[in-house]
Image: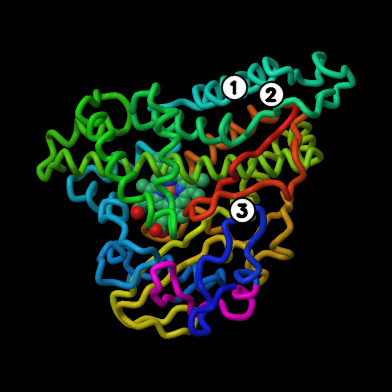
Amino acid sequence: MSLAGGIPHYPFSFRGDALASELGRFVVEEPVTRVVTNAGARGWLVTGYAAAREALKDPRLSRSLIADPDMPQEDSSAPPLSVVGTMTMLRRAGLRDEAVKGMGPRQTHVSLERVRDIADTLLTTMKAKAAENGNASGNGNGNGNGKGNADESAEPGDLVADFALPWASHVTCELLGLPTEAAPELAGWFRLLSTGEMANENLFADWTKALSRFDDWMTGIGTEGLLGRLALLNRSSGHPLSHQELVEIALFLFVSGLGNPAGFLALCGLVLARDPELAARLRREPRALPGALEELYRWSVMLGDSIARIAREDAEIGGVPVRAGELVLISIDAANRDPAVFDSPDRLDIDRRPSMPHLRFGQGRHFCPAAALNRAQTEVALRALLDTLPGLRLAVAPDRIRWRQDHAVLLPETIPVRW
Ligand code: HEM
């Protein structure tokens, strides 16, 4: 842990397969503690479950104020107002309810059958590509023992580039009504979630480039998908959004639909590939999958940054006084591993039935409007993975998995697998 004037520097790690030891210690010893951010600002890091829940619900802690460049920042530059204020902008135009409906479990833009179809197509393509490279699977094509591939030196598949990223990009394109041919290009915009050094170097240029692409798409948007619907309704709004605002909202919704869902699906894939017994149990007991998924949401380490807020007025969080204008950083990953709420919190236990909910989708007024949809879609994608790759396993030792550095949503560089 690097220390700035004795105060730890946050974030601590970009590994998604283990909670940073600093976070594990703070949860127990100092659930609200001082840290210094990438921007060199001081902030309060909230790691304890009770304090995190309290902070997420506290109306005195503002999300929109983090876009104010005069406030202490988590990263070197303040996020654009559209990123933190999308729902407020939609509310002003009278479109918030429609947007929430369009990200909800009963949205009609992309069916679960279609989500499965997208997953199946990606997995079949990955298998075909591997077979072309001489990497036929063990089920009949390989060594014939049904346990996997005879030629372990042949090129394996990659659950990040071949599955999780394109799946999330494609599903979100269809949900939002963006051209599906653009899905591969859009998957590349995962880098918009960069932080720290990488954000300093690339983010401004990438953001400008992405806005220009979204400008084109929103200019040509039809009535399909959530964005098409919002653009249509916007025309009869009493307080319509400008074209530029619609472009920024489109980009924010796309990045929300890409980042967390891709990172989470990749992590689930990694867990299953690393633990064939767990995968086998989920194939034998399909009904165990929703419970397993819920535990994966809790146990996952997904964020390379935090949920940031600025105190509008003096407040007390977890018994610690926070002054007006101070930065508060809430670590959902740490809160979900609080031993005061979850027994042996580092253990992934798919039979766990906790008495308190995990905080993966936030809490209170900014609670993720796509939580139920993501649950349903991820379950479908994991079923496809379990069905299509019956011998799924990692093609490298688990400690060879490298994680992208300086990213707000954690993602391995690659997850090489065989089946
Ligand atoms: C694994 C999947 C996902 C996770 C873990 C996740 C997590 C979260 C969290 C923690 C928040 C609260 C942020 C805060 O309090 O400041 C949030 C808000 C939000 N999420 Fe998600 N999300 C996921 C998927 C999605 C998807 C698929 C979409 C859209 C297609 C989406 C759209 C949004 C939006 C628009 C907000 C802002 C809500 C508001 O400010 O009222 N999310 N999400």
For this orientation, the residue located farthest to the left is 238
Q: Residues within 10 Å of mark 3 (few under 14, many from 20)?
A: many
Q: Residues within 10 Å of mark 1 (few under 14, many from 20)?
A: many
Circles 2 and 1: CB distance less than 8 Å? Answer: yes
Of labels 3 and 1, the one closer to you: 3
Of the residues under marks 3 and 1, which one precedes in the sequence? 3
Indicate yes or no whether the magenta region holds residue 39. yes
Q: Is residue 385 above or below residue 300?
A: above
Marks 2 and 1, how far apart at CA: 7 Å
Residue position marked by numbered label 1 in the rendering: 120
- Left or right of 58, for residue 51: right
Residue position marked by numbered label 3 in the rendering: 16
Residue 191 image position (x, y, % from top left)? 43, 45
Amino acid of disc 3: Gly
Residue position marked by numbered label 2 in the rendering: 388
Q: Quadrant of the C terminus?
A: top right
